[in-house]
Image (cartoon, grey):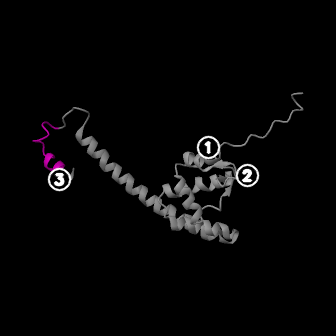
């Protein structure tokens, strides 16, 4: 009996569909806007706006008119939230989605858009690393908690600099 039973295929939970999108996500509408907002960190207002400006395909509705998102919608949202987290302008995100909708003939343009964005992200990361190094030096300058560095803070050579650069 154990070998002949068919186990039902488990539907991915909203969080699983968002965090680990499948290469061919399910297009069955099943996730409420409140679930998607909670999992994605986006507000319901932002989700409706994404749909209105074309970042998401028109979302299916339940018999009561409530939005029902698919795993495919969640996969796209997961990617879009990564792009926003890296600072991609919404206009570039819209352009990317439009190119995706236009089909395989736009693969080179999509790649170019992402390559340019990657270069910008790398530039900002380098700026952040340099800024972090300045903060690290300042922390080192102050030593450990409660440990004076180089004597009295007010009479040390760097105290005037601290007031200027703090």
Which mark, residue 28? Answer: 2
Mark yes or no: residue 82 visible: no
Please name the residue shown 34% across and 53% down the image. Answer: 131
Residue 7 screen position, x and y as percent: 81, 35
Residue 127 screen position, x and y as percent: 38, 57
* Residue most extreme to the left: 155
* Residue most extreme to the front: 64
**Label whose residue precedes the other's in the sequence (3 or 1):** 1
Image quadrant containing the N terminus: top right
Main SS category, magenta section: loop
Q: Quadrant of residue 103?
A: bottom right
State how far apart marks 3 and 1 are (Cα): 48 Å
**Label whose residue precedes the other's in the sequence (2 or 1):** 1
Mark yes or no: residue 68 visible: yes
Between circles 3 and 2, the one closer to the viewer is 2
Which mark, residue 164? Answer: 3
At mark 2, the secondary structure is loop
At mark 3, the secondary structure is helix
State how far apart marks 2 and 1 are (Cα): 15 Å
Is 111 or 72 nearer to us in this picture? 72
Residue 61 screen position, x and y as percent: 68, 56
Q: Which residue is mark 1?
A: 15
Left or right, 109 with respect to 119, comes to: right
Range shown magenta: 150-164
Q: Quadrant of residue 156?
A: top left
Is 74 or 104 nearer to us in this picture? 74
**Label whose residue precedes the other's in the sequence (3 or 2):** 2
């Amino acid at each position: 009996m154990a070998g002949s039973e068919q186990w039902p295929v488990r539907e991915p939970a909203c969080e699983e569909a968002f965090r680990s999108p499948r290469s061919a996500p399910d297009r069955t509408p099943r996730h409420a806007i409140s679930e998607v907002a909670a999992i994605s960190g986006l507000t319901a207002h932002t989700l409706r706006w994404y749909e209105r400006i074309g970042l998401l395909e028109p979302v299916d509705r339940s018999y009561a008119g409530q939005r029902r998102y698919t795993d495919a919608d969640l996969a796209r949202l997961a990617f879009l939230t990564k792009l926003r987290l890296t600072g991609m302008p919404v206009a570039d995100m819209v352009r990317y989605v439009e190119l995706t909708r236009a089909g395989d003939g736009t693969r080179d343009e999509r790649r170019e858009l992402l390559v340019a964005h990657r270069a910008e992200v790398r530039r900002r990361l380098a700026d952040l690393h340099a800024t972090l190094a300045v903060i690290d030096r300042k922390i080192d300058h102050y030593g450990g908690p409660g440990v004076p560095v180089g004597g009295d803070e007010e009479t040390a050579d760097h105290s005037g600099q601290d007031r200027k650069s703090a």
